[in-house]
Image: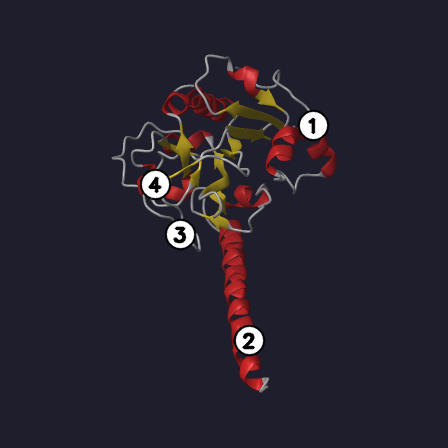
Amino acid sequence: MNIRKYIYPILIIIISIGFYYFEGYLENNKNYSDDKTGGDTSEVNFFYLPTSTTGAIIVHDNYSLSYSEKHEQAEWVAYQLKKEHLSTNQFKRPYFEEDKKVKSLSSDWRNYKKSGYDKGHLCPAGDRRYTKEAFNETFLTSNITPQNHEFNSKIWNYLEQKTRSWAKLYDGVYVVTGGVLSDGLSTIGYEQVSVPEYFYKIIFNNSSGKPKIIAFLMPHKDSRKSLKEFVVSVDEVEKLTGIDFFPTLDDAIENQIESSITIKDWKF
C-alpha cells in the first residue's frame, strides 16, 4: 500500500483545521484588544468580562457577548449602563440583522416568524438610545432570544426599567444578562433556536468604592410577583450556567458578594 498518497491529504486537512482555529484565536484576541483600548464602555467591559463556555466572545461597540452556536443565541450579553447613557431619544426601529462577527453567523430572524415568541432583546434597545448607532446595534440577532410576550412585556420589562433607575440613582451599573441554556430545551425555527426556561440578570455597582451586586433568576412565564421574589445569589446562577461572571475581581471580594443575597443595598 502506498502510504504517501494518504499522508499528504491528511496533512492538508490538519493544516487547514489549524489555520481555521488560529484565525478564530486571532479574531478573538483582536476583539479583546479593540474592547480594551477603544470606545466609551470598553475598559469596564474588558475588565468585568465573564468567562465563556463556548469560546465565541464577540465585542461590539456598545456591548459584548458570548455566542452559543448550539442554542443559536448568546449565553450572556454584558455592558455598562452609565447615567449619561439614559436617553429618551426616539429612533425608528431597524430590521433585525444577522451578526457577521459571529463566525457561523447568528440565527436568522425568520426563525421567530409565526413561532409565538417575541424577539426579546438581551441588551435592551431602551438602554442604548444615546446614539442611533448604539440603538441599531441592539437589533443584531445575536442579541435576541425567544421570549413569551407576557413575560417580555411585563416582569422582564419591569426589571429592565428598574435597572435603568438604578443606573441613574447609583451613577451607572454593569449588567450581565441571558437565558439559562441547557440540553433538552424546546426550540423554534429551522435553525432550532433554543427557548430558555429561565432568564437571569446580574447587576454590579462600584460607584461608592464598595462593590455591591444583585442577581435575578426568573422562570420564563408571566408573573405578578415583586421583583424581590426573584433575587438569588450570583453563585446560584453560576451553578446553573457554568459561567464565572466576575473572574477578575479580587477573590475575597468575589466570594463575599457572589455568595450573598443582598436586597437592602438596592432601592426598590
At x 36% / y 44%, what residue is drawn?
A: 190
Q: Which residue is mark 4?
A: 111
Q: Are marks 1 and 3 in contact (CB under 8 Å)?
A: no
Q: Which residue is mark 2?
A: 10
From this view, report whether residue 173 is shown above or below residue 262: below
- Cα distance, mark 4 to mark 1? 38 Å
Mark with earlier residue (2, 1): 2
For label 1, the SS is helix
- Cα distance, mark 1 to mark 3? 36 Å
Amino acid found under the numbered disc labelled 3:
Leu
Residue 105 shows which numbered tag? 3
Q: Are marks 2 and 4 in contact (CB under 8 Å)?
A: no
Q: Are marks 3 and 2 in contact (CB under 8 Å)?
A: no
Query: Which x, y percent locates residue 170?
Result: 53, 24
For label 3, the SS is loop
Mark with earlier residue (4, 3): 3
Query: Which x, y percent locates residue 186?
Result: 46, 34
Amino acid found under the numbered disc labelled 1:
Ser
Mark 1 or 3: the one toward you: 3
Mark with earlier residue (2, 4): 2
Mark with earlier residue (1, 3): 3
Mark with earlier residue (3, 2): 2
